[in-house]
Image (cartoon, grey):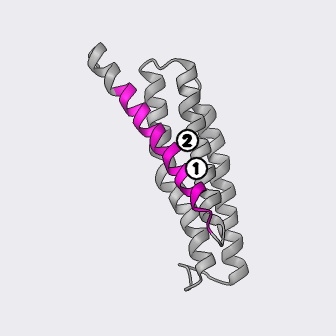
Amino acid sequence: MIWPVYVALLSVLFVVLSIRALRVRRRLGVPIGDGGNALMLRAARVHANFAEYAPLGLLLIAGSEVVGAPGYLVHALGLALLAGRLSHAYGVSQEHEVFAFRVAGMVLTFACYFVAAGFILIRALLVGG
């Protein structure tokens, strides 16, 4: 099985983003919310966006592997999700946001979603579930 490798890699990235947000929170003295601080809001949104998008991607990758996706496809999906989440996190975390990284991150994430969902649906229709 391949998808657990991407679960592990993305879990490490989640912890890194969590620690970054916690450090900003401590440095700014913001116990909850964003305290009206743009930097805190940005750190919190980087972390939250990852939490919002990575789980579905991992579920779709696992589903693809379960229904028989070839190894190269599972790796391509995992790498697209990982690169997408890294790119998005980098772009959004910059004080002077590099919008191209944010867009690239979403394109890679959505590509993972669409390809994996398409593969699962095609397999379900062709094989009958």
Task: Quarter of the image for the N terminus: give it.
Answer: top right
Q: Position of residue 106 (x, y in %)?
A: 50, 50
Looking at the picture, does residue 60 appear above or below residue 105?
above
Please tell me which residue lies in front, 114 or 60. 114
Residues tagged 2 and 1 counted as in contact (Cβ below 8 A)? yes
Residue name at image x 65 percent, y 58 percent: 90
Looking at the picture, does residue 38 appear above or below residue 106?
below
Task: Quarter of the image for the C terminus: give it.
Answer: top left
Specify the amino acid type for callout 2. Answer: Leu
Magenta highlight on residue 100:
yes
Residue name at image x 69 percent, y 74 percent: 24
Instruction: Give the spatial CA distance, label 2 vs label 1.
Output: 6 Å
The main secondary structure of the magenta stretch is: helix
Image disc number at residue 85: 1
Residue name at image x 53 percent, y 33 percent: 77
Which residue range is magenta in the image? 97-120
User: For numbered disc 1, what is the local secondary structure?
Assistant: helix
Residue name at image x 56 percent, y 38 percent: 80
Q: Position of residue 125 (x, y in %)?
A: 27, 20
Please tell me which residue lies in front, 116 or 1. 116
Q: Position of residue 78 (x, y in %)?
A: 57, 34
Report the side of 116 relative to 18 (left or right): left
Image disc number at residue 81: 2
User: For numbered disc 2, what is the local secondary structure?
Assistant: helix
